[in-house]
Image: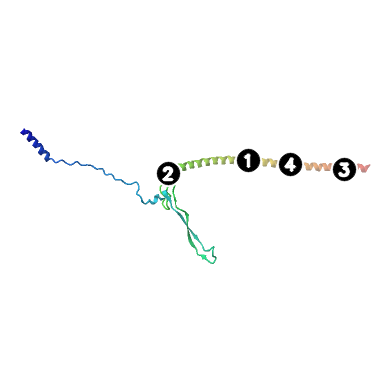
Amino acid sequence: MKIFLLFLGLLFCAGCMSAAKPQEIQVERQIVMPASVAGSNIPEEDLDRIRYGEDMKAYVVGRYIDPSDSSIMYEKNVLYRVEESPQWNLRPNTEIRPPVGKTPREPPTLQKIVESELRSELERQRRFSESLILQTGKAAEAVEKAVAGMKRIEEQNSMLVRRISELERQMGEIDAKIREIEAERTIENLKKEAGK
């Protein structure tokens, strides 16, 4: 039993000598950011997505007479006019109107769409030009045929005119011979009557 007590004492001393290390508790740190902070300013590039600003124009007005009092004349000045009042943008996901100056770079997908549309329009214009060239060629051939036909008709007309003039000349000769013969007959008839 002495050994047992000795052994128990040693265990007790050994237990006191080794200090138990406290367990490290690992705490995960999570940073929570609010989705939107109340009262924060909207970036200038996103303003047109929410509300359109007012559109103002300046007009230079020359001298003019007051319409209610003709004894008053106003000198040349600048008149500022609000052309379009501010209004809310009710269309979601609209493009931002670019400010004067640098133009924003288009996203590649939009650029590809524009390029494909441009290619298809160029192809359509090319096909239209080819068909127009073919139609123009056919029209030119038709005009050449019509001109050739008109030349033939003109030649035939000039031949007919020559024939008609030849026939008129022959008719004139025949008329002259008929008059001669009638004149000779008249003379013979008169001689016969005179001889009786």
Residue, disc 3: 186
Pointer 3 or 1: first along the chain: 1
The quadrant of the rendering that contains the C terminus is top right
Determine whether 130 is above or below 81 in the image: above
Mark 3 crowd level (few <14, some 14–19, many ≥20, 10 Å Cα): few
Q: Are marks 1 and 2 in contact (CB under 8 Å)?
A: no
Residue 96: x and y in percent read 42, 48
- Tag count: 4
* Residue ID for mark 1: 146
Q: Residues within 10 Å of mark 2 (few under 14, many from 20)?
A: few
Mark in front: 1 vs 2: 2
At label 3, the amino acid type is Thr
Q: Marks 1 and 2, Cα distance to the nearest angstrom?
A: 53 Å
Whole-number angstrom distance, CA of label 3 to CA of label 2: 109 Å
- The answer to whether 24 appears left or right of 5 in the picture is right
Label 4 crowd bin: few (<14), some (14–19), many (20+), radius 10 Å:
few
The furthest residue to the left: 2
| Residue at (39% x, 50% y) in the render | 45
Q: Which of label 3 and label 1 is nearer to you?
A: 1
For mark 3, give the secondary structure. Answer: helix
Q: Is residue 54 shown above or below 171?
A: below
The 10 Å Cα crowd at callout 1, few under 14, some 14 to 19, many 20 or more, is few
In the rendered structure, which disc, 4 or 3, sits on the residue that comes first in sequence? 4
Q: CA distance from mark 3 to mark 1?
A: 58 Å
From mark 4 to mark 3, how far is it between C-alphas? 32 Å
Q: Which residue is mark 4?
A: 164
SS category of the residue bearing label 4: helix
* Gap in angstroms between the C-alphas marked 2 and 4: 78 Å
